[in-house]
Image: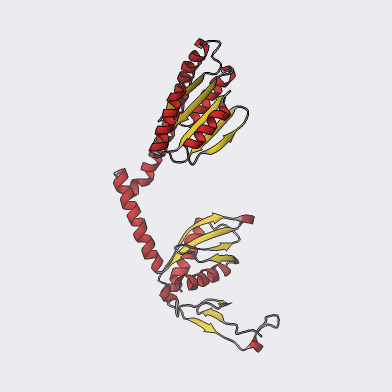
Amino acid sequence: MQQHTGQHLLSAILDNYDIPTLSWNMGETINYIEINKKLSDEEMTKFSNEFNNLITENSSINLITPHPSDFDKSIDTEKGLLRSVKIDNLNDNNPCCGTHLNSTGQLKGLILLNQISGKNNNSKLNFIIGDRIFKFSENNFKILKNLNGLLSCDSNQLSEKLTLLQKNFKKSSSRESTFIKELAILNSDILKQKIENSNSNSNDEILTLYKSNMNLDFINQIFKNLNPIINEKTVVLLVGDVNEIGYILIFGKKTTELSEEFKKIFENLKGGGKNNKFQAKIPNLSKNELNNAINFINSLN
C-alpha cells in the first residue's frame, strides 16, 4: 500500500506543475512513473522535498464513493461503483480501485532515485517509498562496506578510486591488445615457416595451435596472416581454458571434415562456417572436452 499510495501523491505533486503521469509500475524493489520530460537535478530535489514535507503534515487520505448522478455523463457507472482517492492539503482527487493508507505520514519517506530516457522525450522516474527505503539503505551500505574493503578506501574516496581503476584498466587493455597482436604475428611466422618448409607433396598437412590464455582476437589475427598462403593445407586454432569461454577457428582444405570432429568433442559448440573457414565459440570449456580436443589436435600432427 505504501508504494501505491506514494505513487498517487507523487503524481499529484507533479500534476501541479503540469507534468502528467503517462504510466506507472509498482516493482518488487523499485517503482517508476513515466512522465513527459526529464527532470533537472533541481526539480528532483524540489519535488522530493515537497513530497516529504507533505508526509510531515500527516494529511488525511480519504476514499470517496460519490453517487452516480454526481459523475460526468461520459463515465460508465452501470457495472459497479466508482471510487476516488482524495489527499487533503493537495488538489488531488483521482479514481482508483486499489487499497490505500489512511494518511501521508504512513508513507514515512520518498527517495527519487534516477531517470531512464524513454520514447518521445519521455522519462521513467524511479523511486522508492516508506519501509523499502530502510531495506534499500541497508543493502547499499553492505555494498559500500564491501567496496571499501576491496578498494582499501573510505566511501568518499570510491569515485576517485574507481576512476583511477577505469583509467588503468583501459591502459592495461590497450597493452594486452598490443601484446596479443604481437604474439599472434610471432606464432603466425612460426606456422608460416612450417608451411614454407613443408614438402610440396604434403598438401594434406594439418597445422595446429592451442593456447590456453589467448582469445578470439589472437586466432583472428593468425587467420588474417596465414589465410592467403596456406594453399591446400589446413590450420586448426584453439584457445581457452577449463571453465572459461573457448574459441576454435579452422581454415583450409579439410575444414568441413575437421569441424565435424570438433562438433562431436564440444557439446555446446556454437558457430558455423563457409568457404573453407569454420569458426565457433565454446561457452564453457569442460576439463574432459578440453583434454579430448587437445589429444585430437596432437593426433593431427
Q: Is residue 266 above or below residue 86?
A: above
| Count of number-bearing discs | 0
User: Closest to the observer: 232 or 139?
Assistant: 232
Q: Is residue 218 visible?
A: no
Q: Position of residue 300 (x, y in %)?
A: 47, 23
Q: Is residue 7 above or below residue 101?
A: above
270 horizontally vs 137: left or right? right
Question: Going 49% across and 13% down the picture, which residue do you hit?
Answer: 193
Q: Is residue 148 above or below residue 287?
A: below
The image quadrant where one finds the C terminus is: top left
User: Closest to the observer: 236 or 141?
Assistant: 236
Q: Is residue 135 above or below residue 83?
A: above
Residue 134 lies in what quarter of the image?
Answer: bottom left
Q: Position of residue 90 (x, y in %)?
A: 52, 76
Q: Is residue 27 visible?
A: yes
Question: Going 46% across and 31% down the picture, which residue do you hit?
Answer: 215
Residue 273 lies in what quarter of the image?
Answer: top right
Q: Position of residue 256 (x, y in %)?
A: 58, 29
69 horizontally vs 183: left or right? right
235 horizontally vs 80: left or right? left
Q: Position of residue 242 (x, y in %)?
A: 39, 37
Question: Going 58% across and 23% down the picture, which residue do you hit?
Answer: 253
User: Closest to the observer: 8 or 273?
Assistant: 273
Specify the color scheme: secondary structure
